[in-house]
Amino acid sequence: MALLYQPAKKLLHRSLLLQNTRLLSPSLRCTGVAKNYTAINAGWHTCEAGVKREKDPPIHSAFIKQCRVTLSAGVGSRQCWKCQGDVPANMEFCSSCKSLQPLDSHRDHFSILGIKMNFNIDTQALMRRFKKLQAQYHPDRYSTKPEREQQFAHDHSSAVNKAYRCLLHPVDRALYFLDLAGQPLEEGKIDLDSEFLMAIMEVNEELAEATDKETVQSIGRRNTEILNGLLSEADAAFSCNDIEKARKIVAKIKYYNNIYEKVKSFEREHGIVD
């Protein structure tokens, strides 16, 4: 797996291997994590990891609460709207009449895409999964179906789009993890030390005064190195269910991601291509 910064327009047409979703906690463990983060132009992060699995760490209570809510939607069965047959709650199609079932609004992004809840995501696999689901819910496949089923297809497709866009970008993914844990990152709700804020201010001033390609790209390289390191730290924190630590790291990531976007904006405006 790799956290990659790739062009969005290229990323929107690929997806992730179907896995059984278990939403008790992120699957990575606290020890033996070896990361290799990379970054390339105008894209988004994902990471490669060699992970030694050990005894499960204590699961954060907020995660347990969220997972119980999510899993409750996948327990038991429901009645097919068309043939009234039993349909397992985690199945999108009726096995008897093959009709598409309505979207369960309580499902989270991971279960909608059919992937394991994990901060460390294989984005190439995510894109392949996305493409497969988009084809599965494409309007052309339901043009002769009842209007009700056409609406179901539209709802599923919209949910897949929303989930994919959120989980593809590591910053959005990290913020979503905090939401699931019941500790969303809100503006002004977390204190960062003055030394960190001063360092961010200096980088922004340096970037604002930069007028040549070499200076901007040098700033970009330094920033990417820091950003990748923080993403690795966030991955480890989420893996250990240390949500409070993760919140502080994600707050810093947002600042450095903002600098990343400014660097890319400068490069686009000046036609800079590596």
Image: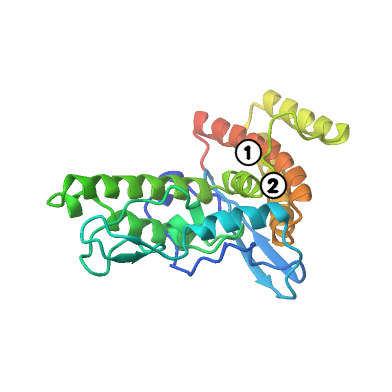
Q: Earlier in the sequence, mark 2 or mark 1?
A: 2
The residue positioned 74% from the left and 25% from the top of the image is 205
Question: Is 258 on the left or on the right of 163, as rendered?
Answer: right
| Residue 78 place in picture, x, y as percent | 36, 60
Q: Which residue is mark 1?
A: 260
Pick the front one: 270 or 35: 35
Q: Which mark is residue 227?
A: 2
| Above or below 155: residue 236 | below
- Give, as a three-letter code, the residue at label 1: Tyr
> Does 17 sit above or below residue 253?
below
**Amino acid identity at mark 2:** Leu
The 10 Å Cα crowd at callout 1, few under 14, some 14 to 19, many 20 or more, is some
Quadrant of the image occupied by residue 208: top right
What separation in Å lies between label 2 and label 1 (alpha carbons)?
A: 9 Å
Q: Residue 88 appears at what percent x and percent y? A: 38, 66
Please give the name of the residue rendered at 66% of the width and 35% of the height, measured from the top-left corner: 259
Residue 206, image x and y in percent? Answer: 74, 28
| Position in image of residue 9 (x %, y %) | 40, 45
Q: Say whether residue 207 is visible.
A: yes
Mark 2, other Cα within 10 Å: few <14 / some 14–19 / many ≥20: many
Per the image, label 1 sits on a secondary structure element best described as: helix
- The answer to whether any part of residue 3 appears in the image is no
> In this image, 180 relative to 104: left or right?
right
Q: Which mark is residue 153?
A: none
Q: Residue drawn at (34%, 50%), measured in percent from left and top?
A: 156
Q: Are marks 2 and 1 in contact (CB under 8 Å)?
A: yes
The residue nearer to you, when weighing 257 against 155, is 155
